[in-house]
Image (cartoon, helix red, strand yellow):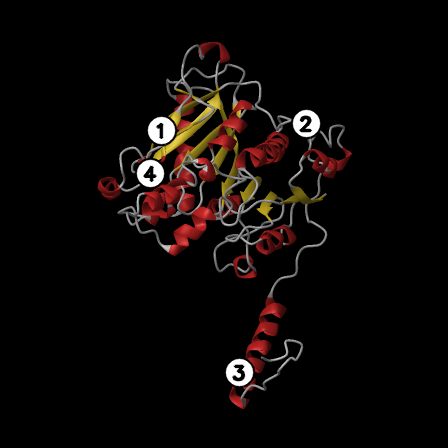
Amino acid sequence: MSDPSVRVVRRAPARSRVFLLLAGVLALVAAACAPAPPTPPLATGYNPDDAPQAGVAAYTGDGPHKVGVTTLSLSDRKVEVWYPADNASIGSTPKDAYYIRSFVPPSFDPFIPPDINPPYVTNAYRDVPAATDGPYPLALFSHGAAGYRLTSTELTTHLASWGFVVIAPDYLERGLTSALGSPPASPRPDTVIADEAINLIKGANLAPGPLNGIVNSTKVYPFGHSAGGGTSLRLLDRPDVDAVIPMASGVSLASIQGAYNIGLPPGKSIMWLGGRNDGIASIANVRTGYDYTAGQKKIIEFGGTGHNNAFTEICEIGGGGAVALAVAAGLPVPDFLLNLGADGCSSPPFTDSPVMWPQVNHLITAELRYRSGLDPLPVGLGTQVTAALPNVLDYRHAP
């Protein structure tokens, strides 16, 4: 048996050494061409540490409004809408629920037992009258790869309870149905889908129905999970978007340099949220996004957090969402989808989603209420708030 304390060094063949040297030179050239992070930020604003309620985690619980939900339609897909409801109109209306099998291709039906279809009960009531103290700011949620418009209702309903209209289109091109082998016949870019969803809600705001007159659409506040974070960043090109929140979504230097059409323009605000244990969107790339943000910026790094458990409810549906249901039914699931669906849920074990949601809900709600003007000064966005958010391991902002 060899001595483990002895380190054997083998010299590479000459051709290999030349190749490694060339690779090193190219890496140095690429690093030299990379733009330097903007320091300090080009756009500055009010320091949230100085706010009177800097350390108050005011938005961990539900807001004053009950939440209504309705479904609108584009030509080829659905758009979900959550809004502040008239509390007195709820009565005995049951809470709305959705079924994960609604987002699985019909070709799977013969192979999945009928009893494998757990409902997920949301904190919203379908098609109830809206509250009358609007209009309310407009937020746009974008789901990630192998997702669907309802992956994060714990967050979308929470925002609505605190005074937002939240819209969420299905991005079929990267959605669950597509990941399981049934892509749309006529794929379209994600930003086009987002544009159409925004125009759709503007039309509904002017038409008879529960959404009439409740939307203030002069500004739009995009936030998104995973690939949906990339959609949110691409929407910074819109003149009516000045603040976005990518969750479990980072950027590489290649993205910054334009290879993936990601820009971080000055004068725009970005709050970056990431999990220290995320095996899909590395925390290193989340930090890169923060470093290269030229405007006002924040980064929150969560412990006990992978890709899904803090930002979606995937881990709580049938023990792990559609992937877990497919595995339970004995269906073959591609490795990439297994890894994506399990990260933050069971591989390895992470903090339970219900523990994470209030912390994420507070930070996103506080940020969007401040950016939209609902809060004249930031509430619970100073570094002092980390004392009330046990899974926040690091929080930085500029200013």
Mark 1: which amino acid?
Leu
Tell me, yes or no, whether the two marked residues, 4 and 1, touch with CB atoms within 8 Å. Answer: no
Q: CA distance from mark 4 to mark 1?
A: 16 Å
SS type, badge 4:
helix
Q: Is residue 61 above or below residue 310?
A: above
Q: Give the mark nearer the N terminus: 2 vs 1.
A: 1
Callout 4 crowding tier (Cα within 10 Å): few <14, some 14–19, many ≥20: many
Q: Residue at x 42, y 36 (%)?
A: 317
| Residue 396 sits above or below residue 221 on the image | below
Under mark 2, the amino acid is Pro
- Residue tagged 3: 19
The answer to whether 380 is drawn above or below residue 232 in the figure is above
The residues tagged by marks 4 and 2 sit, at their Cα atoms, a distance apart of 40 Å
**Rendered location of residue 208, percent (x, y):** 37, 17
Q: Which residue is tagged 2?
A: 376
Contact (Cβ within 8 Å) of mark 4 with mark 2: no
Contact? badges 2 and 1 (CB < 8 Å): no
Which residue corresponds to mark 4?
103
- Tell me how far mark 4 sits from mark 3, CA to CA: 48 Å
Circle 3 Cα neighbour tier, 10 Å, few/some/many (<14 / 14–19 / ≥20): few
For residue 171, which quarter of the picture? top left
Secondary structure of the residue carrying numbered label 1: strand
Callout in the foreground (4, 3): 4
Q: Kindly report which numbered mark, 2 or 1, lies closer to the viewer in this rendering.
A: 1
